[in-house]
Image (cartoon, rainbow, N blue to C red):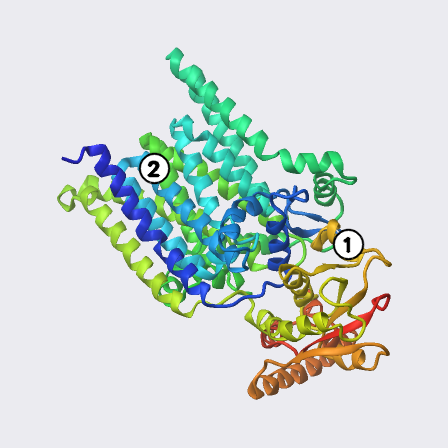
Amino acid sequence: MIEPDDRSRWHRVVWWALVASPLVVAAAVLLWRPWAPTLDMAMTELRVRDVGGRHTPLIGLPGRIGDFPDQGSHPGPWSFYLMAPFYWLSGRRAWGLEFGSAMVNAAAIGVIVWLGHRVDRRWGAVVAAAVCAVAVRGYGLSVLTHPWNPYFPVLIWLVVLFATWLVVRGDHAMLVVVVVSATVAAQTHIPYLVNGVPMCALAIGAALWHRHRSDDAERRRSIVRSIGIAVGVGAVFWLPPFLDQLVRDPGNIRMIVEHFLGDPTDRRVAPIEAVRVFFRHLDVFAVTPDLVLRADAFVHRSGLPGGNGWGGLVVFVLWVAAAVWAVRRRHRSLMALHAVLATALAVQLVSISRIFGKVWYYLTLWAWGTALLVAVSIIWTACIVIAEHRSDLRLRSRVPYVAGGIAVIATVASIIASATLDVPDPQLSGPLRTVLPDTVEAIDDGVGAAVGSDGTYLVFWQDALFIGSQGYGLVNELERRGYDVGVHDTWRVPVTPQRVLPFGEYDAEVHLTTGIFIDQWRERDGFVEVAYTDDRSPEERARFEELRTFVLDRLVVEGRDDLVPVVDENLFGASLDLDLPQDVVDAMSEMIEIGLPVAIFIAPAGNSF
């Protein structure tokens, strides 16, 4: 006979397995989709590859902190540490990063379902599973298998919210879960630092309040132990970035502090825009149809340039009403949830108002996790109110079935969507993979200045498309194949200091060029072109030229002649101008998605700058 606790345990496991299954399917699908990481993904793989060695990373990925090349990084390395075991299991393939992201997110789902069970046993577990299933559907499998630092913590943020809720309710043992999950999120992407610190403070403050209110000496001691364990574990998790601060000058922590306390180089988002973005990320009315029709509803909604946020304002008013009702009725669990949500929403507005420059969609993706729990709190309150007036509806017994149905439907939709899942940035990865075989063969055969596979090579790039994305990928792919490669000191932060090659310490150079720079490189003495590709179809090339003509004409009309040459030399950089009309930005974005030709050259040493 199965004991009640065993049934409860299996109940949690079944819901976890169901909701996490799209991630497993997605990882399997991606196994058969070859991928050459570029830009941030290449930087990520370089650091994951370093884990466990003498250059184990102590800080996170480079961010918009300071000015290139003296830029700071996101606070810490825990995303690299968590992905490393899966990367090793994959045979150090790029797919290992996707596999690792999927498994970390699957683990986060398991923790959330377990936390939901602690809230209200089987009822709480199935509601938590439904929240996770909607989150998986909303964020999409590309986000949850894409090891990019803004994407990595989106489900971990839900862990923070659930665990903080439990601590505020009085479950002080969950304090360590709050600290660990908030730390991983905050170290991975700095917006979570603004959100995570107040959550940890709320959880510790709530634990101290419960200790103050308790007359049970053993419970008081237990709360102190929980706080001590959480603080101790948190200190261990923060050792790497503080060690970096001690051994490096300037340390990364100092660079972060100086950046955010100093005068921003980009203009800060306008207050009215911050409020609009805040309410847009509460608009569950607008996002619900997208959840049915799209596999990435949250990404889509965060990336829309327009929207007034009126639906979000309505949701906010409903949430305030639900919070007032909970306080008046002294509903312990709902009051705790509303305390967490009030804190989360307050720091959400602060976080959004601190954005500098363009409001990129990825800077606010985490806010949808908060919106999901806001929706839960409103629906929960409505169910209680309705049940009090219509006991014949038996809502308490029916809600788990409704939540379970939502979880199943959302999960099936996510699994179906996995059939069309592609690798990140295929327009960048594909051409890089195309030129690699000829590049490797040329190095091995000693073409031009190359001296064979035993030589040391400096990698350089001149990119007209996307700020050197494929150049970083070339460094990563050559290193993966065992070549001794590095970069100039200019790229010491993104490619890591240990991969810097001073002049005189390398035998030849490998140059990646795109777009208009290819013909310029062909005219250089001593440069040998060893690989070339234009992966675009005839239709795509024609569309690119059509868009280019439109953009150049519009720039002249708008009086932005200064950007006309930049379009051909640095397309992504040109698209960042905050004063450009949206139709011009959209056209540039489509051009970037189409891509440009790529060529590889072998050059004698000393020909980069």
Amino acid type, label 1: Val
Q: Amino acid at mark 2?
A: Trp
Position of 49 compared to 555: left or right? left
Seen at 71% across and 65% down, the residue is 453
State which quarter of the image contains the C terminus.
bottom right
Q: In the image, is residue 522 above or below residue 303?
A: below
**In this orientation, does residue 559 appear?**
no
The image shows residue 286 at horizontal and vertical percentages of 41, 61
Element type at mark 2? helix
Q: How many marks?
A: 2
Query: What residue do we see at 51% from left, 48% from top?
Result: 153
Which of 381/47 is in front?
47
Checking the image for residue 500, the label placed there is 1
Relative side of 123 to 376, left or right: left
Percent of width and height locating residue 321: 38, 42
Where's residue 484, x and y in %? 72, 58
Mark number displayed over residue 268: none
Position above or below: 589 against 145 = below
Instruction: Answer whether residue 281 is visible to the viewer in this image.
Output: yes
Q: What element does badge 1 sit on? A: loop
**Residue annotated with mark 2:** 325
Sequence-wise first label, 1 or 2: 2
Contact (CB < 8 A) between labels 1 and 2?
Answer: no
Separation (CA) of disc 1 from disc 2 = 61 Å
Mark 1 or 2: the one toward you: 1
The residue positioned 67% from the left and 52% from the top of the image is 63
Image location (x, y in percent) of residue 501: 80, 56
Label 2 neighbourhood size at 10 Å, few (<14), some (14-19), many (20+)? some
| Quadrant in the picture for residue 243 | top right
